[in-house]
Image: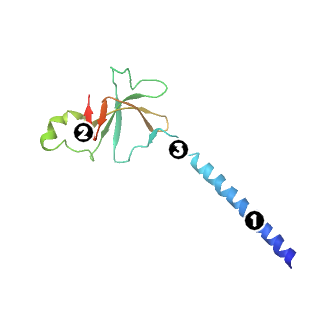
Amino acid sequence: MVLQKHVLLELLLIVTIYFIHLFFLFLFIFFLEFDITAGRAGYPLVSCEIRLVNWDEGQYKTTDKPNPRGEILIGGKNIAEGYFGEASKENVNFKEINGTRYFCTGDIGEVFPDGTFQIIGSLILQILFYFFIFEL
C-alpha cells in the first residue's frame, strides 16, 4: 500500500510537470503573434488616426527605408479643439489636414511593418529641475 502511494505521488508529479510545460509552451506560441519587445509603443487605438510627417531638420522622412520615420501626429474625433485659457497661445501644436484635426506630439517615431510604433526621439528638449520642466 505504501509503495502504491509513492508511485501515485510520483505519477502525479510527472503529470503536473508535463502540464506546466504545456502551459508555458502555449504562452510562448501565443506571444509569438504579438510584439513584446521593449521600446515599442504598440498599436494605435481604433479611435485614433496616427500619421507621420517629415522632419527635415533631423533628416527623418516618411519615405525612409526600411521603416518610415518622422514626427508623430495624432488625429481624430477624440482630439481636443485646442488648449484652454492662457494656454491657447500654444494652439500651434494643432494642425488640420484633409479635414481632420491633428495634435503634433513633438515626438519622432518609426512605424514597423506590423503597425507598431517606436518613439526614437523628441523635437523638444526638456530639462527637469526640481519639479519644474523647462523646454529649450
Ranked by sequence position, the earlier of labels 2 and 1 is 1
Please provide percent x and percent y for residue 117.
43, 37
Say what amino acid the circle numbered 3 marks.
Answer: Ile
Residue 38 horizontal/vertical position (percent): 50, 40
Residue at the spot x=83%, y=70% of the render?
7
- The residue at 28%/41% (across/down) is 131
Q: Nearer the viewer, mark 2 or mark 1?
A: 1
Task: Give the position of the C terminus as an image quadrant.
Answer: top left
Q: Which residue is mark 1?
A: 13
Q: Amino acid at mark 1?
A: Leu
Disc 3 or 2, which lies upstream in sequence? 3
Between residue 108 and residue 33, name the one nearer to us.
108
Q: Which mark is residue 101?
A: 2
- Image point (29%, 43%), residue name: 76
Question: Which structural element holds mark 3?
Answer: loop
Q: Residues within 10 Å of mark 3 (few under 14, many from 20)?
A: few
| Disc 2/disc 1 C-alpha distance (Å) | 60 Å
Q: CA distance from mark 1 to mark 3?
A: 32 Å
Question: In terms of secondary structure, where does tag 2 sit?
Answer: strand
Which of the two discs, 1 and 3, sits closer to the camera?
A: 1
Within 10 angstroms of label 2, few (less than 14), some, or many (20 or more) residues?
many
Residue at mark 3 to residue at mark 2: CA–CA distance: 31 Å
Task: Describe residue 111's horizontal placement relative to residue 2 as left or right.
Answer: left
Q: Quadrant of residue 20?
A: bottom right
Q: Which residue is mark 3?
A: 36
Amino acid on which disc 2 is placed: Arg
Q: Could you say which quadrant of the image residue 110 lies in?
A: top left
Q: Secondary structure at mark 1?
A: helix
In the displayed structure, does residue 110 sit left or right of residue 127? right
